[in-house]
Amino acid sequence: MPKVRSLFLSDIHLGTRACQADQLVDFLREYPAENTFLIGDIVDFWAMSRSIHWSATQNTVVQKFLRRARHGERIVFIPGYWSLAGYAKRKVKTALNFIFDFEESAVHHARERGLDGVICGHIHWAMIRDIEGCTYVNCGDWVDSCTAIVEHMDGRLELVAWGATHPSLVPAPSKPISLEA
C-alpha cells in the first residue's frame, strides 16, 4: 500500500480484552503515513481501573507507534476524558438519539470556529457524511468495527473498515477537506 498523508484512529481501548490489537497491527503494516492522529480512548484507563488485560499484541501496537515516531512520522495524541461510548451503551434506549446529538454538536462547534468539517471518535459509529454543508467524520473504533479514516495525498478521505475481508472502503466526499492540526 502506498504511503498516505494521514491516519485517524480512535477508541482502540488498549488494556482491555475487547481491543482488536491483532487487526490494528495488520492495518498499520498496510498504511504507512506522514501523520497519525490518535483520537481518544487509545489506552482505556477508565476500564483498566476495574480490570487490566494487556496482551503482547497490544504492546506491539504501542511499539509500532513509537517506531513510526522515531522514523519521522508525526504522531498526535488527543486524549479522551471518559468513555462516551460506554455511557451511550448503558443508555441503550437513548443511544441512537445520543449519536445524532453528538454529530449535531460536533458540526455546530466546527461551524462556530469557521471550519469546513470535523473529525472525531468516541461514539464507535464510523462515518463520513455531509451535514448541511459541513463534513462530519467519525473514525469508529478498534473494538467492534475496526475502522479508521485515511487521508490520501490528494486530500480525499476514506473510511476503511478492516475486518475478515479487509480492507473495504466506504465512498468519501468528492471534494478534499483541508485539515487544521
Image (spheres, rainbow, N blue to C red):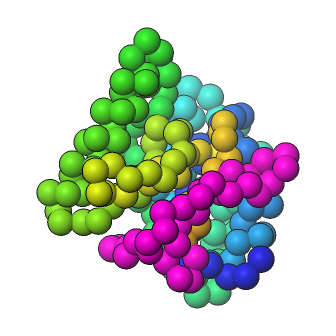
Residue 54 in magenta stretch: no
Q: In the shown orientation, is residue 108 left or right of residue 167?
A: left
The residue nearer to you, when weighing 74 against 132, is: 132
Give coordinates of residue 97: x percent, y percent.
36, 24
Residue 176 in magenta stretch: yes
Direction bottom: furthest residue = 72
Give coordinates of residue 59: x percent, y percent.
73, 56
Q: In the shown orientation, is residue 94 left or right of residue 128?
A: left
Majority secondary structure in the magenta region: loop
The residue nearer to you, when weighing 66 against 147, is: 147
Direction right: furthest residue = 164
- Specify the segment rendered in magenta: 152-181
Give coordinates of residue 48: x percent, y percent.
57, 35
Q: The N terminus lies in which quarter of the figure?
A: bottom right
At 33% from the left and 74% from the top, the residue drawn is 180
The residue nearer to you, when weighing 140 against 54, is: 140
Give coordinates of residue 39: x percent, y percent.
46, 56
At 48% from the left and 27% from the top, the residue drawn is 86
Camera sees residue 69: no
Direction top: furthest residue = 93
